[in-house]
Image: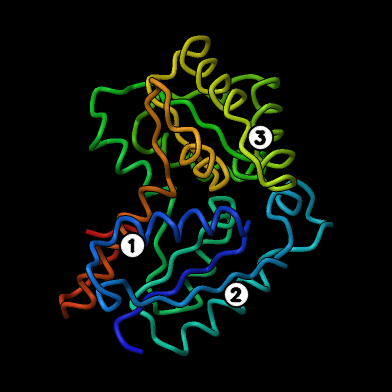
Amino acid sequence: MQNFFTIIGGMGTAATESYLRLLNQRTRARKDQDYLNYILVNHATIPDRTSYILDHHQPSFYPPLLEDIKQQSLLHPSFMVIICNTAHYFYQDLQAATTVPILHMPRTAIATLKKKYPQVQRVGLIATQGTLADGIYEAELQQSGYDYTLGDAQLQSDVMTLIYDNIKRSGKVDAQLYYQILKRMTQEFGAQAVILGCTELSLAQEKAFNHPYRVIDAQSIIVDQSIELALKARAGRPLVIEKGLAQ
């Protein structure tokens, strides 16, 4: 197969399914051959990312991710996308291990925030404790000059309940809890837009999108970028991807 890209998923599988569903729905196709060429690596047994980031005595998710990157690199995809925000903790090391460009989901989300809501100054960030601990989004927000808020301990507890207890454990989205999180971020903490820094939260947005709040859905954005780059590759046009961003 030529002109394809690789999806490194399984972190978790429901979130990866959400990415694939959006990818296929948004691809303009009138026949089978119009869909995109891609390889899905649904590596469900990769250790929990948050557990390792918070406690390095826990199993590391880096070795299996590195193995996936190296294996897929042998097939020469046009680019790769990792369907997990927290896994970007090792982005620099993973990108250094291959010449294949790896899209940077958090960086792409911040770039889209600038374009879509140029008037926004204060941003709310909701994500796993691991993503907050690794500081990936916070570093990008600071470099871009944003004021941001993480909410309070109760809000973070609610976010983890939504991600782990509801979506990962039961496969269900608690829409009311999701709405409450967005409402508190907006009304109590003054967020003018909220970044969904976890692919499970992107699944919540897909299932419970009927709300008035501004959100920057990192997974939805990376879906659109994946389609754009895949179509360019198919047409034989050069891909310019620097620091994980399509230029």
Kind of residue sitting beneath label 3:
Leu
Circle 2 or circle 1, nearest the eye: 1
Kind of residue sitting beneath label 2:
Leu
Q: Which residue lies furthest to the front in this view?
A: 31
Indicate the position of residue 237 as horizontal and vertical percent values: 15, 75
Tag 3's secondary structure? helix
Mark drawn on residue 162 = 3
Indicate the position of residue 107 as horizontal and vertical percent values: 39, 49
The foreground one among 68 and 183 is 183
Say which quadrant the N terminus sits in: bottom left
* Relative to 146, 91 lies left or right: right
Q: Residue at x 70, y 38 (%)?
A: 166
Label 2 crowding class (10 Å Cα cut-off): few <14, some 14-19, many 20+?
some
When the figure is inspected, residue 2 is found, relative to residue 143, above or below; the finding is below
Kind of residue sitting beneath label 1:
Ser
Q: Which residue is drawn at 71% across and 33% down?
A: 161
Say which quadrant the C terminus sits in: bottom left
When the figure is inspected, residue 229 is found, relative to residue 190, above or below; the finding is below
The colour scheme of the drawn protein is rainbow
Q: Residue at x 20, y 71 (%)?
A: 232
Q: Which of marks 2 and 3 is nearer the N terminus?
A: 2
Q: How far apart are marks 3 and 1 (CA)?
A: 27 Å
**Residue matched to label 2:** 66
